[in-house]
Image (cartoon, rainbow, N blue to C red):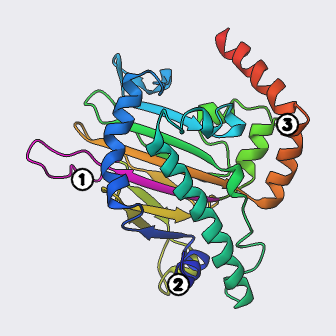
Amino acid sequence: MSASDAAELAVRGYVPRAPLLSSELAAALPAEIDRLIAEGIFEAPGDRIVAGQPTEWILQLGVVWGRPPAQLTGARSPLLGRLWQALEDLGRSYNATSAAAIDAGLATADTMPALAPDGMELVVNRVVGTRAAAWSGLPLHTDDSRFNNALRALGEGSVRHDQVRGRVLTASGYARPLSPSGERMNDLGGALPFIVRPQARNPGDAAVFGIVPAHHNTGVIFFPRTVHGVGRMPAGSVRYSFQAFYPSRAAWAVIAQRIASGELERELATAVVREAA
C-alpha cells in the first residue's frame, strides 16, 4: 500500500485496486478452485442451493474457523499458499502505511488501527448465476457485523464472534474464467457497491454509490465498517473470489490468549456437534 492509498482509504473508506495480484496467480486461481471443488475441499452451503443447483462453493481458512492454512496450503495447494502469503504481506504493508499516515496527520490510531496479519481469516469461493436464483448477492452491510445466517448463529460470547467484531480491514479480489473464444468473462456479477462517505462527496450530494466491478484481477481494500453490498450474479456469470479479513492487533492479542487456553477448541467441538445434529 502506498501513501496515496492510505489517504484515499482514510477519506473514502475503500481503495479499488487493479491489478490486485500477480497476473500469473490471478490466471491460475479459477482452475485451482475448480480442482479443489472436485476434490470435495469446498462446501456448497444449503442456503446457497437454488432449485437443486449450488450457486456457491466456499472454503474458509483461518485458525478461528478450525482450518489453519497449513492444513491445505503446503503440498496440497501451493497456489492457495501463495495467495495466503500475498495477503499476509498486504496486512504488513497496511501496518507500515497506516503508521506513516498517522505520523503525517492523515489518520489516527482509531481510524486506522494496526492489524494482526497472523490472525487473518480467508474465504475463497466460486459463485455462479442461475435463472432460478432470484437473489445471489448480499444487501448493504458491514463486515464487522454478523450480517449473514452463518455469522448470526455465532454465540455473542464466542471467540468467533469476537473475531468478526474485531475486524479492521478487508481485502476482496476476483478472478474470471476464460470464454470459449479466449476472452475473460467479465461482467457486473458480484460488483461491490459502496456508500460514498459524506467527506468524499461533492457539496449537496445525497448518499450515492461507488461501484467496484468484480472483473478479472481487480479488487478493493476497505475498512469493514464501510457500508457496502454485493451485486447479484446474472445467469451464466461465473466469479472466483476471495475475501481476507484482518483483526486489529488489540483484538487478536485477546483472541490468541483464548485460543491458547483451549477455549476455541472447545467452542469448535461444540459447534461441530450442533451442526451434525
Outermost residue toward the left in this view = 181
Residue 269 image offset from top left, x and y in percent: 77, 20
N-terminal of the pair, mark 2 or mark 3, is 2
Instruction: Say how many tags the image has.
Output: 3
Q: Check disc 3 and give the amino acid type.
A: Gly
Could you tell me residue 166's position as x and y percent?
75, 53
Q: Position of residue 77 (x, y in %)?
A: 46, 37
Q: Quadrant of the N terminus?
A: bottom right
Residue 208 visible in the picture? no
Which residue is pictured at 44% across the width and 27% down the height?
48
Q: Residue at x 33, y 30 (%)?
A: 133
Q: Amino acid at mark 2?
A: Ser
Answer left or right for 63 relative to 48.
right
Q: Extreme front residue here?
A: 75
Q: Is residue 268 left or right of residue 54?
A: right
Marks 1 and 3, how far apart in space?
41 Å
Quadrant in the picture for residue 65? top right
Q: Residue furthest right?
A: 261
Q: Earlier in the sequence, mark 2 or mark 1?
A: 2
**For mark 2, what is the residue?**
4
- Quadrant of res 218: bottom left
Q: Nearer the viewer, mark 2 or mark 3?
A: 2
Q: Nearer the viewer, mark 1 or mark 3?
A: 1
The rendered magenta stretch, by its main secondary structure, is classed as loop
Residue located farthest toward the bottom when viewing the structure as drawn: 104
Binning the other alpha carbons within 10 Å of mark 3 as few (below 14), some (14 to 19) or many (20 upward) gives: few
Q: Which residues are magenta?
A: 169-189
The span from disc 2 to disc 3 (Cα, nearest Å) is 38 Å
Q: Report the amino acid beneath label 1.
A: Asn
Between marks 2 and 1, how big is the CA–CA gap?
Answer: 28 Å
